[in-house]
Image: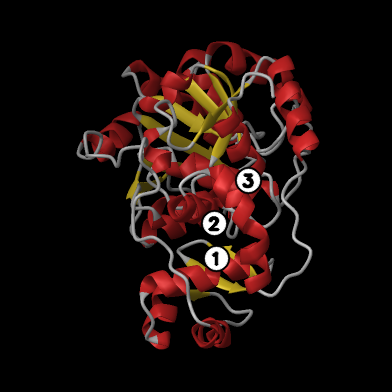
Amino acid sequence: MSALTAGRFDALRLIRTRHVGPVAFRQLLARFGNASAALDALPDLSARGGALGFRAADRRAVEAECERVYRLGARYCFLGEPDYPPLLAEADGAPPALILRGDMALAARRCVAIVGARNASAAAVRLARELAHGLAAVDIVVVSGLARGIDTAAHNGAGPLSTIAVIGSGIDVVFPPENAELQERIAVEGLLLTELPPGAEPLARHFPARNRIIAWMSLGTVVVEAAPRSGSLLTARLAGEEGRDVMAVPGFPADPRAQGCNSLIREGATLVQSAADIIEAIGAIDQRALRSPCSPYAGELPSDLADRERRAVRALLSLSPVSVDELIRQSGLAPALVQTALLELEIAGHLRRHAGGRVSLS
């Protein structure tokens, strides 16, 4: 098990178990107290949700992952531990475990995300670099995704000592290839983060999850060029849903790369033209009280429920996402009972969770 204690190893095994997402992980810890007890309870929960033959993550596979992580010079940080990023810990969908190389103390400082188009214009690349440099000059850490274009410019502008790169692949995978040197510099001098195990390839489905980490660990997100329906706009919307500041650089209306930013501004995002605008926007919130990252499993505990209650919740679900609050209202059941029904369905592989606290059948 390498450097992981038994408790941390069980937590990682729970995280790597199929159908145990971040929300389910929190609820399982709240209900059963520790990961070992949660692992023991999974087969019964899965059967109640309508699945048969449930198996937890293979112990040997998780042991092999641990050994590989430490061979790479990386380490784990689990939700609830003191050095877990405090702003990220506030989000219900925060990843239960992060794999990192570098200085985790950077994540406890004031952080601002800068994201944007991969095929950015030369002017936008220059502005992103200047914005990041201006933020780093006043001890604000710049967070981005190490992609081509705006992300790369933001990391370079801030310098490796003042930047966090969140990647959508394993800690040992370089993407894009031309950023190999930059990624290594950030890992050595700044902070490189991922929630994916070593060897995970940068697949398209990984990037929305990567984007939520970028948005949720930052006080605000700045978008510098983004086409409609782009990943950068998703990052901004995730930030807004979590109550973080959303900022955007305006652009020429005829340029498709400016349409996303202009739309954000029209919807209420703060217009940004300089680092001073960003500093002013986050100045009023950088000292706000945070939920303690050392107690992430507080709240109403899930409860046992009768078959009729389970059927009532299931009947309200469809392939169209609906908010959990709406399910509670329409079912007339206590919130803990609804959450238990959803947890059982999720463990069984019949429930999908969406942004904004919405769920659907999978």
Say what amino acid the circle numbered 1 marks.
Answer: Leu
Q: Residues within 10 Å of mark 1 (few under 14, many from 20)?
A: many
Residue tagged by mark 3?
Answer: 14
Residue 258 appears in the rendering: no
Q: CA distance from mark 2 to mark 1?
A: 6 Å
| Colouring of the image | secondary structure
Say what amino acid the circle numbered 3 marks.
Answer: Leu
Mark closer to the chain start, 2 or 1: 2
Q: Nearer the viewer, residue 6 or 166?
A: 6
Mark closer to the chain start, 3 or 1: 3
- Per the image, label 2 sits on a secondary structure element best described as helix
Q: Residue at x 57, y 28 (%)?
A: 165
Counting from the top left corner in percent of width and height, residue 330 is at 41, 87
Quarter the C terminus occupies = bottom right
Residue tagged by mark 2?
Answer: 24
Mark closer to the chain start, 2 or 3: 3
- Per the image, label 1 sits on a secondary structure element best described as helix
Left or right: where does residue 331 sit relative to residue 28? left
Counting from the top left corner in percent of width and height, residue 221 is at 42, 42
Residue tagged by mark 1?
Answer: 343
Q: Residue at x 54, y 81 (%)?
A: 310
